[in-house]
Image (tube, grey):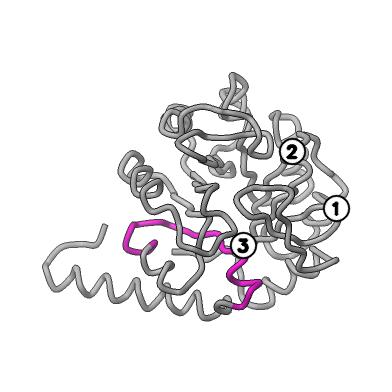
Amino acid sequence: MQVIPAVDVLGGRAVRLAQGDYEAITQYSDDPLAVVEEWAASGAELVHVVDLEAARSGVPDFGLIRQLGSLEVPIQYGGGIRTPSVAEAAFQAGLARLVIGSALLDDSAAMFASRIDVQAIVAGIDVRRGRARGSGWRDEGIDGDEALARVLDLGLTSVLATGIETDGMMTGPDLELLSRFRSSAPVCHLIASGGVGSLDDLGLLVDLGADAVVVGRALYERRFTYGEAVARVSHHTETKARRWGDHGVAPP
């Protein structure tokens, strides 16, 4: 399971929200690009960046996108990518992956699958009280399971699943949501997001079968370091493989 550090950007600062609430902001740095480079120096092979203002307004900041695209570390970016033409421009600016959320909840979703390499698209499904929310988590959206089914029907192969009510709280991930998505989409690349607050949480996600995890506040609050997270995931994965091997079956 890959550990992906997160950098949320709002007003030119690196911040974290609590439960998707724009009024519940904690600022961590005045230089988000420097934070990205710090994660890269720590060994991160991919950094997850969300432009929160663009997610809310639907208008991406291409100044920021170009700066991110110029960095050596690959960037998984979300925020304001609502049309295929904007997505194509973001890729041309150097971004490695794009998280598409709001656009997947309406009739424009099929255009992405027809024009953009699906391997470079991550379907972002942010769920609160069973509903997949868009537009900076403000709209009512659609049923979360329906959103996943729509993503799979489009042929998208990566899903970033966020339990909004756990996001930024460090009280543990939404295991019920993630388990349901894992069962419904056993072959998709499932990226867990929201709620991680301890190394034990990472072990639970390995057991669940997540392919990657986005971690934000727990790293900034020094609950553990990036290196400690990677080490715990590696150890837990090896332990899981040995445990299943002792029973003569392959781990899920």
SS at mark 2 in the image: helix
Q: Which callout, 2 or 3, points at the residue further toward the start of the chain?
A: 3
Look at the numbered discs 2 and 3 and tell me whether their residues touch, using CB distance below 8 Å. no
According to the image, label 1 marks what residue?
A: 11
Q: Which callout, 3 or 1, points at the residue further toward the start of the chain?
A: 1
Front residue of 55 and 107: 55
According to the image, label 2 marks what residue?
A: 56
Q: Residue at x 51, y 68 (%)?
A: 197
SS at mark 1 in the image: loop
The part of the chain drawn in magenta is 205-222
Instruction: Say if the magenta span includes residue 165.
Output: no
**Cα–Cα span, label 1 and label 2:** 13 Å
Q: Label 2: few (<14), some or many (≥20) within 10 Å?
A: some
* Rendering quarter of residue 48: bottom right
Q: Is the residue 153 above or below the residue 202 in the image?
A: above
Q: Residue at x 12, y 67 (%)?
A: 248
Residue 70 x, y percent position in the rendering: 80, 58
From the image, state whether disc 2 or disc 3 is nearer to you.
Answer: 2
Number of the label disc, if any, that sits on residue 202: none
According to the image, label 3 marks what residue?
A: 46
Q: Label 3: few (<14), some or many (≥20) within 10 Å?
A: many
* Badge 2 amino acid: Arg
Residue 107 x, y percent position in the rendering: 59, 19
